[in-house]
Amino acid sequence: MCPRVRLTLHDGTERDYLLDGPSSCPRPRGPHATYEQRVHLAYVLARQGHDTCWLARFADLPLPAAERVTEAAARADRT
């Protein structure tokens, strides 16, 4: 299963977003998994240690979404 996180972006709809890119997760994503380049970018940069507020601005994500992506990146780095 590809890593994913449940987020609400600017459209206000909560959905599951894939954290890895399509080349890393080539299998079918299921009906509720969405690939969004900004979420993937934020995840990669969070794993490199970038700050949550900076990620929200740089990737144009709502702050709560950037926080969830940062938390997922921290969990991934611990495993």
Image (spheres, rainbow, N blue to C red):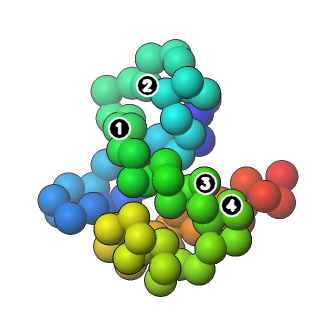
Q: Which quadrant of the figure contains the N terminus?
A: top right
Using the image, determine if residue 6 lies above or below residue 35: below
Between the residue at mark 1 and the residue at mark 3, the CA separation in whole angstroms equals 17 Å
Using the image, determine if residue 28 lies above or below residue 65: above
Q: Badge 2 is on which residue?
A: 29
Residue that sits furthest to the front in the current view: 58
Residue 33 appears in which quarter of the rendering?
Answer: top left
Give the x, y percent position of residue 69.
52, 63
Q: Badge 1 is on which residue?
A: 34
Task: Give the crowd class for mark 1: few <14, some 14-19, many >=20 residues within 10 Å.
Answer: some
| Observer-nearest of 17 and 52 | 52
Residue that sits furthest to the left in the current view: 11
Between the residue at mark 2 and the residue at mark 4, the CA separation in whole angstroms equals 22 Å
Q: What residue sits 39% from the left and 45% below the top?
A: 37
Q: Are marks 2 and 1 in contact (CB under 8 Å)?
A: yes
Q: Secondary structure at mark 3?
A: helix
Q: What residue sits 37% from the left and 59% below the top?
A: 7
Q: What residue sits 27% from the left and 62% below the top?
A: 9
Amino acid at dot 3: Val
**Tag nearer the camera, 2 or 4:** 4
Residue 44 shows which numbered tag?
3
Amino acid at dot 2: Arg
Residue 44 appears in which quarter of the rendering?
Answer: bottom right
Give the x, y percent position of residue 35.
38, 38
Is residue 72 at all visible to an observer of this figure?
no
Q: Is residue 40 left or right of residue 2?
A: left
Q: Are marks 4 and 3 in contact (CB under 8 Å)?
A: yes
Amino acid at dot 1: Thr
Along the polypeptide, which appears first: circle 2 or circle 1? Answer: 2
Between the residue at mark 2 and the residue at mark 1, the CA separation in whole angstroms equals 8 Å
